[in-house]
Amino acid sequence: MEYKDYYKILGVARNATADDIRTAYRRLAKKYHPDVSKEADAEVRFKEVGEAYEVLKDPEKRAAYDRLGSNWKQGEQFRPPPDWGNQFDFGGAQGGGSADFSDFFSSIFGGGFNAGSSGGRRQQRRAGRGTDQQATIRIDLEDALQGAKRNFTLNNNLGGQRTLTVNIPKGIKAGQKIRLSGQGSPGAAGAGDLLLEIAFNPHPFYTIEGRDLYLTVPIAPWEAMLGASIKVPVPGGGSAGIKIPADSRSGRKMRLKAKGIPGTPAGDLYLVLEVVLPPADTDRAKALYEKMAEEMPFNPRSGLGV
């Protein structure tokens, strides 16, 4: 099959930044969108641009693609090295793209290799094979932190149900897909595959963005103004001690490196400070607030000119 130069498709250099890649994708996707483009090959170009962006936007997929090396040039016949499909781990999710992606994409990321064959030849799609199906499954954050085996019940179009046991790889992200071979639509030459897209259940503490986690940390006014040493929970259990810098404000972010979802690289845990006021629900509390008002003249609206 022909090697695809994703950088050339997007019109960016091989050292392009993530912002460069995103900007190029948005421009080309708008240009070739089949609903608005008058180009004869708009649909084909639109799919090529989407496939290129799917690879280059993800640091792990991009790194794996770059490992093909500079010896592979546009127009050459691409033959993956032996066991290439087993050499990288995208959080355990196989088939990280759409069924519309090319054979070249599937040969790298789709788990379509026969690892025991000489030269890592890709298994050919048989005529009459059933179509692939897709579904979304929701997992808990703890499943991605440690890895897990879970049972999921899926509904089909005929009103029936089936229960599948799925291995959740450690470090998987929202949007990644797990491929279950032979679990798709039946066909004369065998069933297609089932692609399960990962989504997360809401967590009581953490907000999930990729492999990064965000935790809102309430602090008292005196902790914010004077600084303090406090403890915060960390993903997977336990706690970590942190120092709140003096003169902190609500919205300030503090980072605990590699405390997010595991991966290469691991995600970070971001602590978002939120100053919380004590309630004036007793006479003593009210008296303290009145004393502050007398001894600490402060106009929070001074910036408004009033």
Image (tube, rainbow, N blue to C red):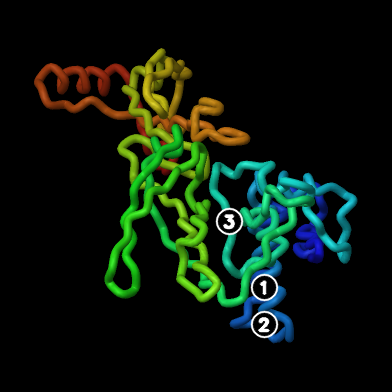
Cβ–Cβ under 8 Å for marks 1 and 2? yes
Which labelled disc corresponds to residue 95? 3
Mark 3 vs mark 2: which is more N-terminal? 2
Residue tagged 1? 46
Dot 2: within a 10 Å radius of its alpha carbon, few (fewer than 14), some, or many (20 or more) residues? some
Q: Name the disc covering residue 150, or none.
A: none
Closer to us: 162 or 138: 162
Q: Residue at x 69, y 54 (%)?
A: 108
Q: Could you tell me residue 4's position as x and y percent?
A: 78, 62
The answer to whether marks 1 and 3 mark residues whose Cβ atoms lie closer than 8 Å is no
Drawn side of residue 238 relative to residue 127, left or right: left
Q: Nearer the viewer, mark 1 or mark 2?
A: 1
The quarter holding residue 33 reads bottom right
The location of residue 235, given as percent across then percent down, is 41, 29
Q: Dot 2: what SS?
A: loop
- According to the image, label 2 marks what residue? 37
Give the distance between the C-alpha atoms of the residues marked 1 and 2, in whole angstroms: 10 Å
Question: In front: 91, or 84?
Answer: 84
Give the amino acid at mark 2. Ser
The secondary structure type at the circle numbered 1 is helix
Q: Where does the N terminus fall, quadrant-wise? A: bottom right
Q: Label 3 is placed on what type of residue?
A: Gly
Count how many numbered circles sit on residues in the image: 3
Asked whether residue 264 appears in the rendered view, the answer is yes
3 or 2: mark nearer the eye: 3
- Figure check: 45 above or below 212: below
Q: Earlier in the sequence, mark 1 or mark 2?
A: 2
Gap between marks 3 and 2 measured at Cα: 29 Å
